[in-house]
């Protein structure tokens, strides 16, 4: 069975390449300092949500709470028991204090956390909020129980989001009475600083709920990406494939763990803040990628068989930027802009890394 894609995630096969704008060669370190602080908004700046509840106060719940409180959302935090909630609130206060001392957040955030409301149970936490964020253990029976409690107590218009990192959203939605207001909202650790968030609608999720969640996340400086409801979604599917091969390199004696991590950081991983794997392939040459797959398949087996869509691109003469067509399409001017922008990004990142180390 194929993975269902959200309707507005499906793109025309002739999609143009995305070239990040270049605003002049400013100091990379100055740019880093400018962008590193968590976005702080006055209370009431956002039209939605005004009030939110976070159910589950572990690493992810606390990090999301810090983001939302900074954005001016009135957040109620709840954990498994009242005493655990109070301990989690203390950890959040300590976390924010440390971030303020490091210059990563506005010190005024300390006072917001100190005055945030706590709840003794999930029902009282969610009964008058616009958005509920579930961040409990990654076990489907635990999440279903918590979601049942949330749904029974929340207002009919409250949007409910799960932070599951791998459980199919359709499976969680199937047990709800009103699944049209439910979706996945997969944050990444550390949630305060990682910009990308996967939004995963169920088959029955109201598109307006997706649009509302996406607009909110964009307003607080995040980069939401709508993806389909398959196991692991997109990020963990790719991340686990990378980890599997990295571990295989260590197990087979090709390199030490330190060497594998350095290869990833300093070689292909160096490009990833700016370009994803498909556009990197376009710039390298899809014909080159096909040939490399052939070598890997002969040496490592069928898991490296040339993907059918890659083979089809090459057979049609679509090699990427050098032919103007690959996974993306490029005019001659766009190719030129893309390659000079690439070199500028990499030079700026090299400068930044040299100064941080």
Image (tube, helix red, strand yellow):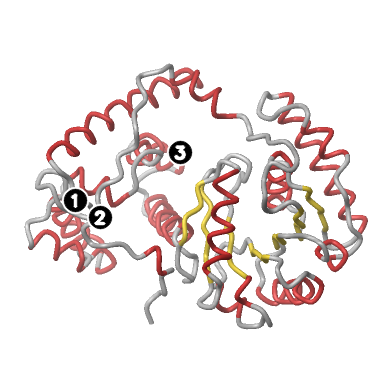
Mark closest to the chain's N terminus, 3 or 1: 3
In the depicted structure, whether residue 319 falls above or below residue 310: above
* Residue depicted at x 82% and y 72%: 153
In-image side of 261 versus 290 (left or right): right
The residue identified by callout 2 is 15
Residue in the image at 72% along x and 61% along y: 132
For image coordinates 55% across by 73% down, the residue present is 205
Q: Are marks 2 and 3 in contact (CB under 8 Å)?
A: no
Q: Quadrant of residue 90?
A: top right
Say which label, 2 or 1, has the lower sequence index: 2
Q: x, y percentage for residue 61?
A: 71, 53
Residue at mark 3: 258
CA–CA distance in space, label 3 to label 1: 38 Å
Q: Which mark is residue 261?
A: none
Q: Is residue 36 above or below residue 183?
A: above
- Residue 182 pos. (x, y %): 62, 70
Residue 41 on image: x %, y %: 68, 36
| Residue under numbered circle 1 | 329
Q: Secondary structure at mark 2?
A: loop
Depth check, front residue: 228 or 75: 75
| Mark 2 vs mark 3, CA separation in Å | 39 Å
In this view, the residue in front, 249 or 143, is 143
**Label 1 element class:** loop
Query: In terms of depth relative to the viewer, which is nearer, 158 or 308?
Result: 158
**Real-space CA distance between mark 2 and mark 1, rounded to the nearest whole angstrom:** 6 Å
Number of residues whose C-alpha sits closer than 10 Å to that of mark 1, classed few (under 14), some (14–19) or many (20 or more): many
The image shows residue 248 at horizontal and vertical percentages of 39, 56
Q: Secondary structure at mark 3?
A: helix
């Amino acid at each position: 069975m194929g993975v269902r894609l959200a309707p507005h995630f499906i793109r025309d096969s002739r999609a143009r390449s995305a070239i990040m704008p270049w605003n002049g060669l400013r100091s990379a370190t100055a740019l880093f300092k400018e962008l590193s602080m968590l976005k702080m908004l006055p209370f009431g700046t956002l039209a939605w949500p005004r009030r939110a509840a976070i159910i589950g106060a572990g690493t992810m719940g606390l990090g999301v709470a810090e983001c939302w409180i900074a954005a001016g959302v009135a957040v109620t935090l709840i954990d498994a028991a009242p005493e655990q909630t109070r301990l989690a609130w203390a950890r959040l206060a300590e976390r924010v204090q440390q971030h303020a001392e490091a210059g990563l957040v506005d010190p005024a955030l300390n006072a917001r956390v100190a005055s945030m409301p706590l709840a003794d149970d999930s029902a009282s936490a969610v009964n008058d909020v616009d958005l509920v964020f579930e961040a409990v253990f990654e076990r489907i029976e635990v999440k279903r129980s918590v979601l049942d409690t949330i749904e029974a107590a929340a207002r009919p218009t409250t949007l409910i989001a799960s932070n599951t990192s791998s459980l199919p959203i359709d499976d969680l939605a199937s047990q709800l009475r009103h699944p049209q207001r439910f979706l996945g909202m997969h944050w990444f650790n550390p949630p305060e600083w990682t910009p990308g968030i996967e939004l995963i609608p169920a088959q029955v999720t109201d598109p307006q709920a997706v649009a509302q969640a996406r607009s909110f996340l964009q307003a607080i400086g995040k980069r939401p990406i709508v993806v389909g409801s398959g196991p692991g979604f997109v990020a963990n599917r790719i991340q686990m494939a990378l980890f599997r091969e990295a571990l295989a390199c260590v197990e087979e004696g090709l390199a030490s763990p330190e060497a594998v991590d350095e290869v990833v950081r300093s070689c292909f991983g160096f490009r990833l803040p700016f370009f994803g794997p498909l556009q990197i392939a376009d710039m390298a040459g899809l014909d080159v990628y096909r040939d490399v797959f052939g070598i890997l398949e002969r040496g490592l087996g069928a898991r490296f068989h040339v993907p059918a869509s890659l083979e089809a691109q090459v057979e049609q003469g679509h090699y990427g930027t050098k032919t103007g067509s690959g996974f993306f399409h490029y005019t001659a001017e766009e190719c030129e802009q893309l390659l000079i922008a690439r070199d500028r990004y990499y030079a700026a990142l090299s400068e930044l890394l040299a100064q941080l180390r």
